[in-house]
Image (cartoon, rainbow, N blue to C red):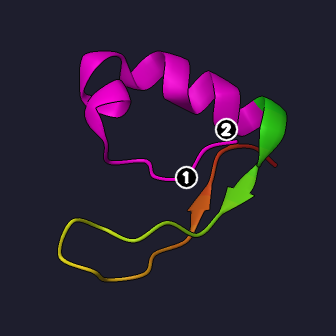
Amino acid sequence: MIESMFDQEYLRDPHAVFARLRAERPVFRPATPQGVRVWVVSRQ
């Protein structure tokens, strides 16, 4: 399961993270490093 979009895995390979998001959680609500909650929609 993806816990955060803004961790080291994302920084190393953001394309792989978005591929996993599309497959596992097309609508995802992570927090930014500043603590702001955002919505990420990776597919429709």
Residue 43 placement, left or right of 29: right
Q: Residue at x 64, y 23 (%)?
A: 19
- Up the image or down, 27 lies above or below 1; here it is below
Q: Residue at x 27, y 31 (%)?
A: 8
Residue under pointer 2: 21
Magenta span covers which residues? 1-22
Q: Amino acid at mark 2?
A: Leu
> How packed is label 2: few (under 14 Cα within 10 Å), some, or many (20 or more)?
many
Q: Residue at x 24, y 28 (%)?
A: 11
Alpha carbon separation for disc pair 2 and 1 = 11 Å
Q: Nearer the viewer, residue 3 or 43?
A: 3
Q: Main secondary structure of the magenta part?
A: helix
Residue under pointer 1: 3
Residue 37, quarter of the rendered image: bottom left
Which quarter of the rendering shows the N terminus? top right
Determine the residue located farthest toward the bottom in the rendered image: 36
Magenta span includes 2: yes
Residue 26: x and y in percent read 76, 49
Residue 41, quarter of the rendered image: bottom right
Q: Residue at x 31, y 83 (%)?
A: 36
Residue 41 placement, left or right of 18: right
> How packed is label 1: few (under 14 Cα within 10 Å), some, or many (20 or more)?
few
Q: Secondary structure at mark 2?
A: helix
Magenta span includes 20: yes
- Up the image or down, 2 lies above or below 29; here it is above
Q: Nearer the viewer, mark 2 or mark 1?
A: 1
Q: Amino acid at mark 1?
A: Glu
Residue 20: x and y in percent read 67, 28
